Image: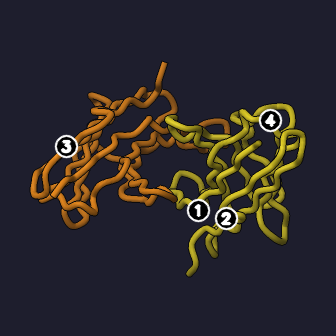
Chain colours: A orange, B yellow
Amino acid sequence: EDKVVQSPLSLVVHEGDTVTLNCSYEVTNFRSLLWYKQEKKAPTFLFMLTSSGIEKKSGRLSSILDKKELFSILNITATQTGDSAIYLCARGDSGAGSYQLTFGKGTKLSVIP
Amino acid sequence: NAGVMQNPRHLVRRRGQEARLRCSPMKGHSHVYWYRQLPEEGLKFMVYLQKENIIDESGMPKERFSAEFPKEGPSILRIQQVVRGDSAAYFCASSPSANTEAFFGQGTRLTVV
């Protein structure tokens, strides 16, 4: 059973639309929730969230974490074709002196002109 | 400050050969992580290393796979006697400490023929 579940798996929108991507997770060993953008190559870091209710913003992107309901959302406003990518959500797990990221399968966003 | 550097970007090996994947972390980062991404799958944790130490190798197959991060030089992920199922993108990430955001390299795409 997946520990990090993202929805939707894929999404097609028009330029200018606003999108909301969802990520739910199991709580075991939770330390942080991270969002990455993956185009054809390296996942690019977007946000790291550790506290509930505090929105993080970067330009047209924003994200928030709800530790009570165990989910996070990533919002993108006024989408552009350059936003087309796979958006990955990862839970940072900490335990027994280790630290690792558990990724969801991603949401594939396609922004069409 | 150069990002995480991985080489080679693409590697083709015949079944039974050895594959060596290299990763130089970002300057100032002493924590290195290796992830594998199979087609249509999410990123899966393999191993977490600090200088000269393997902290967590719980995600790495017990046979044929090994990793090291020597005092000098890059981290190496070594796959002996490769099989077709090893074909995947292998990503390295680094961070300055545990429980912080990890930055990914461009990945090495291994193809076993």
Mark 1, residue position: B105
Indicate the position of residue A93 as horizontal and vertical percent values: 53, 38
Mark 3, residue position: A20
Q: Determine the image quadrant of residue B25.
A: bottom right
Task: Judge depth for marks 4 and 3 and give the one in front.
Answer: 4
Dot label at residue B6 = 2
Q: Seen from this angle, which residue lies furthest top?
A: A1
Specify few, some or many for label 2: CA neighbours under 10 Å numbering under 14, 14-19, or 20 or more. many
Indicate the position of residue B60 as horizontal and vertical percent values: 74, 36
- When the figure is inspected, residue A98 is found, relative to residue A48, above or below; the finding is above
For residue A94, say whether it is visible.
no
- When the figure is inspected, residue A57 is found, relative to residue A105, above or below; the finding is below
For residue A50, say whether it is visible.
yes
Q: Amino acid at mark 2?
A: Gln
Q: Are marks 1 and 3 on the same chain?
A: no
Q: CA distance from mark 4 to mark 2?
A: 22 Å
Q: CA distance from mark 1 to mark 2?
A: 6 Å
The answer to whether the residue labelled 1 contacts the one labelled 2, judged by CB atoms less than 8 Å apart, is: yes
Indicate the position of residue B112 as horizontal and vertical percent values: 75, 43
- Helix, strand or loop for disc 1: loop
Name which residue lies at 38% across and 29% down: A5
- Helix, strand or loop for disc 2: strand
Dot label at residue B83 = 4
Relative depth, front residue between B60 and B101:
B60
Instruction: Please report whichever mark, 1 or 2, sits nearer to the chain's N-terminal start.
Output: 2
Q: CA distance from mark 4 to mark 3?
A: 40 Å
